[in-house]
Amino acid sequence: MGKELVSREQDYSQWYNDLIIKGSLADYSAVRGCMVIKPYGYALWENMQGVLDKMFKDTGHQNAYFPLFVPKSLFEAEEKNAEGFAKECAVVTHYRLKADPNNKGKLMVDPEAKLEEELVVRPTSEAIIWNTYKGWIQSYRDLPLLINQWANVVRWEMRTRLFLRTAEFLWQEGHTAHATKEEAIEETRRMLDVYADFAENWMALPVIKGVKSPNERFAGAEDTYCIEALMQDGKALQAGTSHFLGQNFAKAFDVKFSDKNNQLDYVWATSWGVSTRLIGGLVMAHSDDDGLILPPRIAPIQVVIVPIYKGDEQKAQIGSVVAGIVAQLKGMGISVKYDDADHNRPGWKFAEYELKGVPVRIAVGARDLENKVVEVARRDTKEKTTVSLEGIDMYIQNLLIDIQQQMFNKAKAFRDDHITEANSWDEFVQILDTKAGFVSAHWDGTAETEDKIKELAKATIRCIPLDNPQEDGVCILSGNKSVQRVLFARAY
Amino acid sequence: MGKELVSREQDYSQWYNDLIIKGSLADYSAVRGCMVIKPYGYALWENMQGVLDKMFKDTGHQNAYFPLFVPKSLFEAEEKNAEGFAKECAVVTHYRLKADPNNKGKLMVDPEAKLEEELVVRPTSEAIIWNTYKGWIQSYRDLPLLINQWANVVRWEMRTRLFLRTAEFLWQEGHTAHATKEEAIEETRRMLDVYADFAENWMALPVIKGVKSPNERFAGAEDTYCIEALMQDGKALQAGTSHFLGQNFAKAFDVKFSDKNNQLDYVWATSWGVSTRLIGGLVMAHSDDDGLILPPRIAPIQVVIVPIYKGDEQKAQIGSVVAGIVAQLKGMGISVKYDDADHNRPGWKFAEYELKGVPVRIAVGARDLENKVVEVARRDTKEKTTVSLEGIDMYIQNLLIDIQQQMFNKAKAFRDDHITEANSWDEFVQILDTKAGFVSAHWDGTAETEDKIKELAKATIRCIPLDNPQEDGVCILSGNKSVQRVLFARAY
């Protein structure tokens, strides 16, 4: 069938790439580092968007849309942000092509159509948005301003990988403005909680909430909060970030408000985002050597039904029974596909929907109908059960809930089993090289030591967990005093 | 209040711009020709997207996502398409900025980061999509391929106007592939019908379905079908297009399929799109000198409730009654806002929601409560009625249906009243200069005459209506033989 995957053990990276392509989530494109999101992958993204969008609206946010382009003079206004993204900016310099006089049928950039000021394709939208907020915020009555944008952004990455790191990606970016520092920090934490809720309860992906070390902060932030997840190869993945931006952007774009006492002050800001990268994390955390395993709550197809028949008469008999099952399940809000195509055999279909990670498969044969049963297979454990047609709807509904929970439990057990304490440099390196996962170790709190650890062990501080216990110790590298352990890992 | 608008009669163009800004739909941005879509405008777009997306899915389409950038060599592959869009392309030439050594704190384009091949920011996605389809289509079993994309596109227009013509805009673009010419034409017509259905039944915007003259075709199409609407100033607006692309793109990108007899042939194509331009048409077709008038079926807020009270006690009494009304209406799926903010007076609120085009306003005063009534005002006619609290939910539901219907009827009567026959050149010009609207006139069918009419009268052929009656006549300009009347107009 040409659908077999390399095993995870053999080549994890190849397994991942093959799975994305063969599982019909995405495809390479003709544009360096950019991908095509195929219908099945996009349907997954739509489901994720739908849940997140509701969560954002339930917490008081509204959607809006800001320009794709950022004039260079605005882009450079917040210096740290500009410095952080300058090296990966796609830049529009011209606004016209013309016929190439030396090359019939070909076009060339028209040198006479050079822009006076270059336009940066947004790598993130703080600059263009805060320049706009300047016109929208005058008084405390205009605050808080709670806005989210669903958009595409471009970061010219040198090494790309489907979903996890692409030159163009889709995301949402929240940008909020507040009257006080406390409110802004509260918002930053609230959205971190929303992300963690989404990751754990919808994607079945356990995450650790924490704060980044200064070296790993978003460019222009005072503090970057994050959720960190663990992949099956023991590498960490940053799954979402929420930034407390202080008054940095308000100062760069001169955004002030008058408070109730008519005093002028700069506005406090946050920004937060998750992207199509989450799909990469989802695949890497849950899937197996036979294909994707998608959590029921966001799977594009939750149940697939495959008939097993000989001849049109059997097919029709099965079809009429299945129609009833489909109606029952749809009535419960469950998405079902009945695949009765003649040109593929049942075995081919079983493999295909395993590859695509459909959580539940129901197989219906002629003999089953006589016994008023069907065969139900769950994708996560591959267990098969014979189930009575009577009450099949409730059985499936409960099974989907169980699969969702078991997927989370399994990923959490793996994650918990892969947080290891290291108390010396040798131990630290050994764990990274053998067991991998998060390594909890003492660090002296300096950027120099952090840089050196990254250089020597290829591991970064993923986060300082929230409510981290304080504990005296010595830094695994420098031997200097440390007040807490932090989580290191090799990461995507 | 600083919210007054110039009247339509005084300056229609200024009225429109002011209304977009003051009605909180959009704002100008720092990027030439690009706008910011504000939360209220974006909520309207989300409602429109929701309806259209369902219509697309109900007709068998799936969403996907293709890259923002088109390498120049792909862009130029379909020559007519390339020629048509070359003059308005934003072009990315570099992928990095660096610190400007001569200008502290500023950035410059890094000349060492020049792309080997320039990237065009998509003005439309046929090229990148058909280059992808090449890998997806081998056999008749892969057809039809029915895909839609929601995306931003960029066309470097010299003269821009909020929503109607912006350098960047949001749209959807359908791109389908078929085994036969007939199927592709059928799809083109099906999607035209979907657009007309959406315009008339959701936007309350009557449209004429037709086909474009060769001069006005989409670059690269064999035939362009369109829906044309009429604005209150008598100018026409192209509200959506659906293109039969023949085998042009399949040939340019070498996309062939083997049919049931194993014969290879090029694939047949369509593409179709509507954009945020529709919002401009909506505003221009329905609104008045006091503000927006939004059709209930897509209005972000369908009903606003304003309390009229003195003191906290009255406010609380009214609030408890309103809570019941809000619950009733929400239960019927009606979106309601209760504006009980203390810092704005009722008169200010009335004007504000008139400006924003909320279809129904309910005012509740203390005296009303004694009489168990409320005052209901409809935005379209400004009629006010005293309505009993008993049965208020059904009353509002019916009122929303009636407003939707009346808005359509009014726009249709205006449109029908502005289709005028002209039988000579003088008559033609006189109608355009005085009454405006569509002018139904004989045309000899040549591109030369069409060009000359455009030059002399600033009017274009909007469309040849579907099922146009055939009628012998003479061309209003050339005097040559003509077989049918076509619809001319000055247009946006």
Image: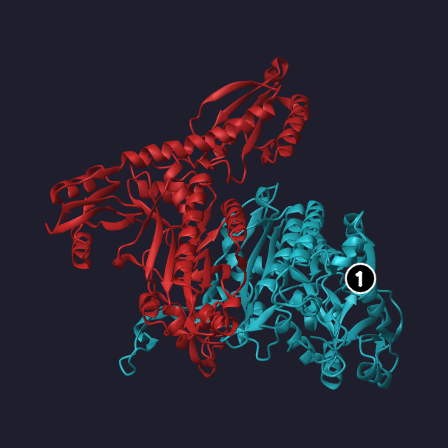
Chain colours: A red, B cyan
Would you say residue A103 is visible in this rendering? yes
Going 44% across and 43% down the picture, which residue do you hit?
A: A197
Going 61% across and 41% down the picture, which residue do you hit?
A: B261
- Does B336 sit above or below residue A423? below
Q: Quadrant of the C terminus of chain B?
A: bottom right
Q: Amino acid at mark 1?
A: Phe
- Does A262 sit above or below residue A84? below
Q: Tell me which chain the residue with mark 1 is part of.
A: B
Residue B276, located in which quarter of the rendered image? bottom right
- Does B83 sit above or below residue A294? below
Where is residue A251 drawn, in percent x and y?
Answer: 38, 73
Q: Quadrant of the N terminus of chain B?
A: bottom right
* Foreground of the two, B303 or A47: B303
Going 54% across and 75% down the picture, which residue do you hit?
A: B156
* Foreground of the two, A180 or A173: A180
Circle 1 crowding by C-alpha within 10 Å: few under 14, some 14–19, many from 20: many
